[in-house]
Amino acid sequence: MSLYENLLLNLDNGILVITINRADKLNALNIDTIREIKTAIQQVYDDPAVKGAIFTGAGEKAFVAGADISEISELSEVNARSFAERGQEVFSMIERCTKPVIAAVNGFALGGGCELAMACHMRVASEGARFGQPEVNLGLIPGYGGTQRLTQLIGKGKAMELMMTADMIGAGEAKALGLVNHVVPAVELMPKCMEILNKIVSKAPLAIGLVIDCVNAVYDKDENGYQTEANSFARCCSSQDFIEGTNAFLEKRKPVFKGA
């Protein structure tokens, strides 16, 4: 039996494309899909053949158009907390992954879909993509980290406005706010993500992972980001990749990194 009923996984030249495959539900995140995403991102962590990952949605309408409302409507105060914490745990795994993860946003990224995109290290959007946290329309707030990550990415004032009005914004405005890195025509979405990832995975893997750790430390109240940076810098200097990178530079050749 397949591990995945709601995801499609395709590994090509070191890049694992993870597609939320519920197009008839606009790729809404139900409990089973969250569980499968956890399994998929664990594969990114564990499989040395995977150098980076892309999350996207099946079909042309949606990346992920929210969570499964039929499941949410059954929540009580007691099980709602564990519901939110499970999603936060999975999205934190994505955010803390030491291999690069990009969201290829190919349509609506609403509610949990916007939260999934924000958990990725970068976001590339098609021109027709739309973003929003409309949970207040249901008498709710974002529960998978949206209140935190949206504020980190676009600032307090605009994050407050979007979450309290439930307004959607287009890809162009999302880019202007810093929510999105690039906006491209739909046909160029996956090629652009592949271009970025192929550039990243050509660099020293250990250094890439430590960049992710250090940037995440900016937002960790329990961590001294400057100390994390100094420790990570020192760790790089003890690596074979550091020796290879500096020697290649001095010898005017292309480095061959081993991730060690």
Image (cartoon, rainbow, N blue to C red):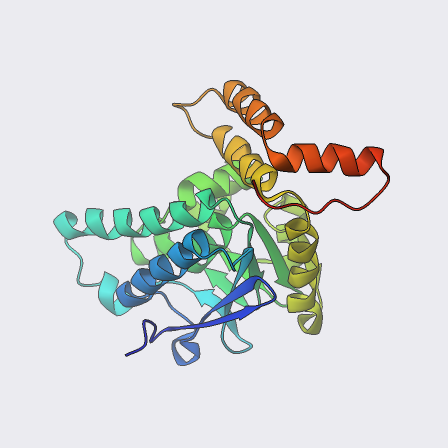
Q: Position of residue 145 (x, y in %)?
A: 38, 45
Q: Is residue 56 above or below residue 158?
A: below
Q: Tell which of 188 and 244 is nearer to you.
A: 244
Q: Tell which of 60 and 76 is nearer to you.
A: 60
x 75%, y 32%: residue: 246
Q: Is residue 56 above or below residue 162?
A: below
x 70%, y 53%: residue: 199
Q: Position of residue 140 (x, y in %)?
A: 30, 51
- Residue 52 placement, left or right of 89: right
Q: Position of residue 190 (x, y in %)?
A: 64, 67
Which picture quadrant has residue 2? bottom left
* Residue 134 shows in this picture: no
* Image quarter hosting the C terminus: top right
- Residue 149 placement, left or right of 211: left
Q: Is residue 207 above or below residue 203?
A: above
* Image quarter hosting the N terminus: bottom left
Which picture quadrant has residue 20? bottom left
Q: Is residue 54 above or below residue 201?
A: below
x 58%, y 36%: residue: 211
Which picture quadrant has residue 178? top right
x 53%, y 49%: residue: 99
Q: Position of residue 9 (x, y in %)?
A: 46, 71
Total number of numbered labels? 0
* Residue 243 shows in this picture: yes
